[in-house]
Every structure is written in C-alpha cells, then in structure tokens.
Image (tube, rainbow, N blue to C red):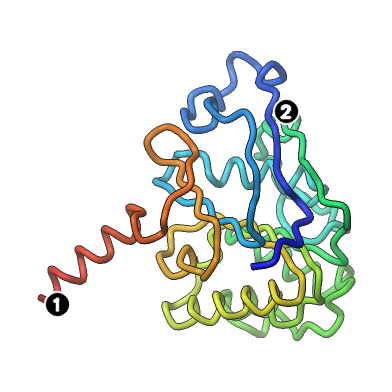
Amino acid sequence: MLASRFIRGLSIDWERVPQDSYLRGILALTRLESLEFTYDVTVFVGENGTGKSTLLEAIAVAAGFNREGGTLNFTHSSYDDVSELHEALTLVRGFSRPRWGQYLRAETLYNVATLVNTEYAGGHKSLPDLHAQSHGESFLSFLRYAPGRSLFILDEPEAALSPRRQLELSELIMQCVSDGSQFIIATHSPIVMGIEGAQVLSFDNGHVHEVDWRETDAVRVMRDYLADRLG
C-alpha cells in the first residue's frame, strides 16, 4: 500500500499518568513509549484486557474525535468513561489533513446513528436512514458513503457483522484506502486482521509487537477449532 497516513505515530509520556491509574496495570501499555504506523491500515489484536481498545480510544480523542464516537464535529456525550491516557499521548501527524473522519465504537453506534440522521451529517449527507438498517448494515454504510482521504478509527467493527459481511467490510476498507484513507482498527476477527497489506500489532505477551496475522492467537484458535470440528 502507498502510505498516505494522517497519523504517522505516537508517543506516551508516562509521567503524566497518575501513579494510581489502572492504566499502569496494563502491561503492554506500560511498556509502550512510542509507536510508528507504517501502513495505511493498522490493526490492533490481542486478548481481552490487553489494552488495544484503550489505546485506540486515546488515539481517537487525541485526534479530536468525540469520546463516544462520531465525526470531528460531534460533541454529544451520555457517559464519560474515557481513560486519562489521551492526556499523556502525543500524535505524530502527517503533512496533510483528512477531508473527513469517523471514530466508531460498536457500543455507542446507536447514538452516533441518531445524530448523523439529525444534525451531524457533514460529509456524509448522502447516508441513508441508519435506524432503518441493521446494526451491521449501518456500520458498513459509513464506509460505503465515505468521501476520499478520510481517517477511520474503528473499535471491533466486526461485532455486528456475519463472516460474509466481515469480508465485505474488508473489501470496503481496501476501496477506501485506494481513495487515500487511513484506518486504525482494534479487532478480534481473523477476517478483519487479514486485510491485505495491513500492519498487525499484537498486544499479547505483555508488549506491543508486529506479527504476521496468520500467527495471531485468533487465527490459531479458529483454525484449530475448524480442524477439530470438520476433521
């Protein structure tokens, strides 16, 4: 993939994180001081509780997105559960700015869809009525109707998608990348983490490190399960 990244990396100043913060108990995060994004699609993988969604959320907030998801224009908030990590995080930005952006969290998509349908359509004015679609379909609509050169930060986008729809999601992401967009994704899906050319960063084993997606625990568990059930 050609690199047209809007976010090229990050650094964390742990002196700005309180000593009693729960963040200091997440081993992969406490060992992380800097990170470089070398591809247009970066995928965070790892077991529950390893810090991938926490870091993704901090990146989104530091980039200017609403804490509950949405575009850069969203200001709605129903419950503030964001960690203080974004206050210690500095983004390394590219030379150009995205035309549009979206931070999507599966658990707050309903609120985002409501606001998109009413007052925050912005660059997505051609979107259909998201409440007339299923949860998964509305998630895909954000990509189908996205303008080029957009920044997407997606937290477990596969949550409401069937395997077939996850394949469609992967294809839509590739199309958006060809239009100059960048994606940072946290996922448990072997299909999503297998997007061609993606940088896969594992949070397992207590540190953030690049891996081949075929060697991730998610892929190994699914492969072994299918081999056992089908063999």
Kindly identify the residue that appears in the image at 81 percent across and 76 percent down.
Answer: 147
Of 196 and 152, which appears nearest the observer? Answer: 196
On residue 88, the disc is 2
Q: Give the farthest residue toward the left.
A: 231
On-image quarter of the C terminus: bottom left
Q: Residue furthest front?
A: 2
Residue behind mark 1: 230
Residue 32 in the image: state x and y as whole percent.
Answer: 57, 30
Label 1 packing within 10 angstroms: few (<14), some (14-19), many (20+): few
Asked whether disc 1 touches disc 2, contact meaning CB atoms under 8 Å apart, the reply is no
- In percent of width and height, residue 18 lies at 65, 17
Q: What number is the disc on residue 162?
A: none
- Describe residue 152's horizontal placement relative to residue 107 as left or right: right
Image coordinates of residue 7 in percent, x first then y, are: 75, 50
Mark 2 is on which residue type?
Ala
Q: Secondary structure at mark 1?
A: helix
Picture quadrant of residue 113: bottom right
Give the amino acid at mark 1: Leu
Depth check: give the residue in front, 156 or 43: 43
Quick check: 124 left or right of 173? right
Identify the residue shown where x is 51% and y is 69%: 195
**Is 214 placed left or right of 220 in the picture?**
right
In the image, residue 189 above or below residue 94: below
Q: Earlier in the sequence, mark 1 or mark 2?
A: 2
Q: Is residue 169 above or below residue 51?
A: below
Where is residue 123? Give x, y as percent.
Answer: 87, 74
Q: Quadrant of residue 89?
A: top right
